């Protein structure tokens, strides 16, 4: 099989079918074939996704590539969650995030290439910068997914809805722990990634603290710090914390895609 | 197959009479033995608060008793019990006001035979015939009835296969349809909701407010999740002490209720108070001391102990009262009813497959006996014929004659055996007729 022919459509469609199967499980929770379809298509999507990234392998890349990697890791975690928590509607929340990241990633691909003015010595720094931001992004995605699940679960409990077979979620306590761990994981990694980026930008005269890329990245660090403060100092656990995780995810997307609508020095070449 | 069920349930018989028919564990062996001696070699009696059913079966085709005959026996039994001023279940007390005639009793009884009896048992085991559709207790009651009969020795191959299959069908229906989804008791429903809030209970403190029965029952369920601490807070300290002792809890003084509200993660409230015990303002005052810990409240009291406005507080993850739990229970029941057609279809298909399986099982030995008998006759006649022609036939001639006899036997047997297989699948009685026709009955039948 020619893996070079695997396109974004292949794995996006596969994830899409898996998500539809998961939606149908809300009505037919005990019908095993639906779960098998969901797992099968997620796994198939992941294989195609892996092939896509492997055949277009490059140690560093633009935001489009980073988002594709981020989507791959989230899809992998989603599949693990779906296998591990048989009855939880895991894929229902994870796959839309994966599809969103893929869509954004493919729309950014091509628009933003590799930084052209980078010397060979900086390659490892850029690789570490990108890897840290992607791993930090994983934490943000996990806390976002848990945050959305938390709000749905909290809404159901507050409205005293019957707990049918259809939509099964983790307990509020477990979801809150997931948000907390996601943020605690993302904060140091993302901060280190941003700091590394700043170290690379420092010798250049053109950049400023008001560069949209720098601002959005730093803003996310501030949001993380606020979230951790809310949790550990002010003992905030409830819906506000979940909304904070959602805000962090929006800022992550903004930080990764801001160059498409705001000029930035981030590409080392002076904007788009 | 020869099986029948005669009985009464909550729809056909008033509760008073059902209570009189009910058989306790101690009386069951006697009843089973008597029924076996009088009516059929295989007997199982299913006696619950909502139904009384007698399952009778025999391998041979002899008639099983009708509802009228059993009604007569039951009426006589009730009369005997009434003269002894004993409730049939053995518990002295319940006076029997008057005897009941067999004709009266028969009015309340239903009877299902063969395929319908099989289907009925499967429906009962799945909870499709229950007062609360899909209830899970009945599956255990059916199992228990079977086990008791097995211990007494009134279960034979047919009822053994039938009750074993009933268990399988019950599990399948509950697993594959939504007919048993959700919980129906207030206590277990409440617990289900608590599980949606907390991941672990081992580090949680439970506060039981009041000494109401429902609160105690819910606490009993909750203790299975092993909470770290149980606080019992009641106006009457004596009652609190009794409960605390029973459930390894700590007594908490009523005048320090606010401190208890700070300590507790889960509150089960069932006081007899006529007024709201915890208002929103009162709880709001203690919330800052809780350091953002989660809070879930099951207000099981009527009238309510907790101000409903408390549910709006950000810090309270769950507040359910009895009305909420009853409404949810009704929703669960409505949801279950949607799955009844699917469950009925599954029961029907399982009934068909049981009948077909049983037919195959019972047909095998009968066909073998039939073939053996014909084989014996063929050999006998063939031997007579060949002995007369002794020495006049070549080995080839002998082979041709033997072949002709065998062919004749097979041709004669082909049509009845085919008809037999088809008829037995339909639940007909041709097998019985055939066995009689060829004199193939054995004493074991």
Image: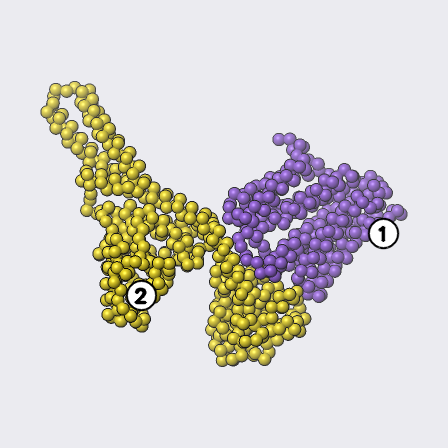
Chain colours: A purple, B yellow
Name the residue beneath numbered marker 2.
B20
Q: Residue B121 at what x, y percent from top left?
A: 36, 52
Which one is in front in this view, the residue at disc 2 or the one at disc 1? Answer: 2
Q: Residue B173 at what x, y percent from top left?
A: 44, 50
Secondary structure, mark 1, is loop
Q: Residue A146 at what x, y percent from top left?
A: 64, 54
| Above or below: residue B115 compared with residue A177 | above
Pick the quarter of the image with the C terminus of chain A. top right
Residues at discs 2 and 1 in contact (Cβ within 8 Å)? no
Mark 2 to mark 1 CA distance (whole Å):
88 Å
Secondary structure, mark 2, is helix
- Number of numbered discs: 2
Query: Chain letter of disc 1?
Result: A
Q: Residue at x 66, y 65 (%)?
A: B314
| Above or below: residue B44 compared with residue B281 | above
Name the residue beneath numbered marker 1.
A210
Q: Residue at x 56, y 46 (%)?
A: A24
Seen from the viewer's position, the closer of residues A53 and A169 is: A169
């Amino acid at each position: 099989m020619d893996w070079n022919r695997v396109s974004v459509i292949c794995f996006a469609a596969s994830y899409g079918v898996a998500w539809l199967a998961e939606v149908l499980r809300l009505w037919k929770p005990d019908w095993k074939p639906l779960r098998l379809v969901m797992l099968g298509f997620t796994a198939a999507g992941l294989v195609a996704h892996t092939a896509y990234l492997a055949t277009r392998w490059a140690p560093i890349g633009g935001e489009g590539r980073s988002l594709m990697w981020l989507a791959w890791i989230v899809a992998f975690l989603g599949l693990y969650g779906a296998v591990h928590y048989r009855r939880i509607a895991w894929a229902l929340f994870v796959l839309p995030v994966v599809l969103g990241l893929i869509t954004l990633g493919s729309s950014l691909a091509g628009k933003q290439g590799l930084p052209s003015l980078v010397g060979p010595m900086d390659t490892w720094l850029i690789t570490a910068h990108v890897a840290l931001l992607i791993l930090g992004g994983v934490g943000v995605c996990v806390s976002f997914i848990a945050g959305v699940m938390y709000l749905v679960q909290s809404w159901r409990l507050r409205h005293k809805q019957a707990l049918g077979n259809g939509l099964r979620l983790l307990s509020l306590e477990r979801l809150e722990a997931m948000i907390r761990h996601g943020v605690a994981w993302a904060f140091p990694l993302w901060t280190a990634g941003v700091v590394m980026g700043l170290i690379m930008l420092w010798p250049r005269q053109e950049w400023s603290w008001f560069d949209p890329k720098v601002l959005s990245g730093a803003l996310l660090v501030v949001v993380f710090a606020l979230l951790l403060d809310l949790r550990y100092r002010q003992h905030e656990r409830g819906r506000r914390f979940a909304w904070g995780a959602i805000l962090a995810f929006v800022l992550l997307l903004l930080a990764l895609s801001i160059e498409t609508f705001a000029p930035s020095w981030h590409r080392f070449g002076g904007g788009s | 197959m020869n099986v029948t069920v005669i009985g009464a349930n909550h729809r056909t018989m008033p509760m008073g009479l059902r209570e009189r028919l009910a058989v306790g564990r101690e009386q069951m062996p006697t009843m089973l033995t008597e029924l076996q001696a009088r009516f059929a070699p295989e007997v199982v009696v299913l006696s619950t608060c909502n139904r009384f059913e007698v399952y009778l079966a025999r391998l041979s085709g002899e008639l099983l008793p009708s509802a009228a005959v059993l009604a007569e026996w039951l009426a006589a039994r009730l009369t005997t019990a009434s003269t002894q001023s004993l409730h049939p279940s053995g518990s002295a007390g319940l006076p029997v006001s008057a005897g009941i005639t067999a004709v009266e009793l028969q009015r309340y009884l239903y009877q299902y035979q063969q395929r319908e009896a099989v289907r009925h048992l499967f429906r009962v085991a799945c909870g499709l015939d229950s007062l609360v559709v899909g209830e899970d207790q009945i599956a255990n009651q059916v199992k228990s009835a079977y086990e008791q009969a097995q211990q007494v020795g009134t279960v034979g191959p047919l009822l053994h296969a039938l009750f074993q299959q009933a268990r399988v069908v019950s599990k399948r229906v509950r697993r594959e349809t939504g007919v048993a989804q959700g919980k129906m008791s207030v206590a277990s429903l409440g617990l289900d909701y608590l599980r949606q809030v907390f991941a672990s209970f081992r580090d949680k403190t439970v506060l039981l407010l009041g000494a109401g029965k429902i609160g105690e029952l819910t606490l009993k369920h909750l203790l299975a999740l092993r909470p770290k601490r149980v606080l019992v807070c009641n106006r009457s300290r004596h009652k609190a002490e009794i409960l605390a002792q029973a459930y390894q809890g700590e007594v908490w003084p009523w005048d320090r209720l606010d401190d208890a509200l700070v300590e507790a993660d889960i509150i089960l409230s069932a006081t007899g108070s006529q007024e709201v015990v915890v208002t929103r303002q009162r709880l709001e005052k203690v919330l800052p001391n809780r350091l953002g810990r989660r809070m879930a409240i099951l207000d099981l009291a009527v009238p309510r102990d907790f101000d409903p406005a408390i549910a709006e507080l950000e810090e309270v993850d769950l507040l359910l009262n009895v009305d909420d739990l009853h409404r949810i229970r009704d929703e669960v029941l409505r949801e279950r009813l949607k799955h009844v057609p699917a469950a009925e279809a599954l029961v029907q298909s399982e009934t068909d497959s049981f009948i077909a399986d049983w037919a195959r099982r019972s047909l095998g030995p009968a066909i073998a006996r039939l073939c053996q008998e014909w084989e014996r006759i063929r050999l006998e006649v063939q031997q007579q014929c060949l002995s007369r022609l002794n020495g006049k036939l070549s080995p080839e001639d002998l082979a041709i004659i033997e072949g002709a006899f065998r062919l004749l036997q097979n041709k004669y047997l082909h049509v009845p055996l085919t008809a037999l297989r088809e008829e037995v699948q339909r639940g007909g009685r041709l097998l019985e007729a055939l066995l009689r026709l060829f004199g193939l009955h054995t004493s074991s039948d």
